[in-house]
Image: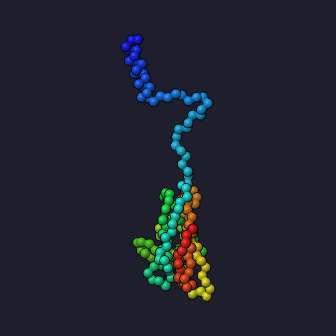
Amino acid sequence: MDYRLWVLLLVLTAGMVIAGCSAPLSTGTPRPEIGTAPVPAVPGPLLMTITAEPPEYSPLMSSTPGIRLSVLNTSGILPPGAVFRWETSYGYFLSWAPPEFRVVRLGPVSQGGPEDIYWSYDPMPSEKERPEVVITLTVTDPVSGAPLADRHLFISWKDHLVAVPGQQS
């Protein structure tokens, strides 16, 4: 064989190796799809924890307007603008935030962002026992309205007047 033919054959072989050529798929094998994997419209469920301070509360205390409820996202990514909806079976919610630090009564249902919120109740003495309080937090996607997280905080009573935050579910 001619020397130029060997050089041409060597260059073609090197070009095929560099280009990464492979054997074609057989006619019975479906061709793989190329593209991105579908992204779910709503992120998966999130795990939230509610922090309640102080450990005991009575409206007769002057240092705080109520039990401060803070939310900690312990998993997942919270979408921007997520809606935080608070509901209580007894009592009401308050806001107390900068810059004015003015206490505003919100009622038994409140909806907003991830900012802290306060829970309180009327201190009027009651002859019968107060009911166990269930505070429910539901976080929803701002676009679809789909629930992302759901958490319950239970509050019990000490001496019929002091609220004691307890377990969560």
Q: Which of 92 and 1 is in front in this view?
A: 1
Residue 166 vs 5, above or below: the answer is: below
**Residue 10: which quarter of the image?**
top left
Residue closest to the eye, 16 or 83? 16
- The residue sitting at 47% across, 77% down in the picture is 54
Q: Which residue lies furthest to the front in this view?
A: 1
Q: Residue 157, image x and y in percent?
A: 56, 81
The colour mode here is rainbow
Q: Give the mark count.
A: 0
Q: Quadrant of residue 17?
A: top left
Res 145 visible: no
Q: In which quarter of the image is the N terminus?
A: top left
Quadrant for the C terminus in the image: bottom right
Up-down relation of residue 17 to residue 85 (above or below): above
- Residue drawn at point x = 57 percent, y = 64 percent: 150
Horizontal side of 98 relative to 123 (left or right) equals left
Nearer to me, 122 or 166: 166
Looking at the image, residue 41 lies above or below residue 18: below
Residue at the spot 58% in from the left edge and 28% down from the top edge: 26
Q: Is residue 150 visible to the viewer in this orientation of the structure?
A: yes
The image shows residue 41 at horizontal and vertical percentages of: 56, 52
Q: Where's residue 6, x and y in %? A: 40, 16
Residue 122 lies, in percent from the top left, at 55, 82
Q: Residue at x 60, y 82 (%)?
A: 130
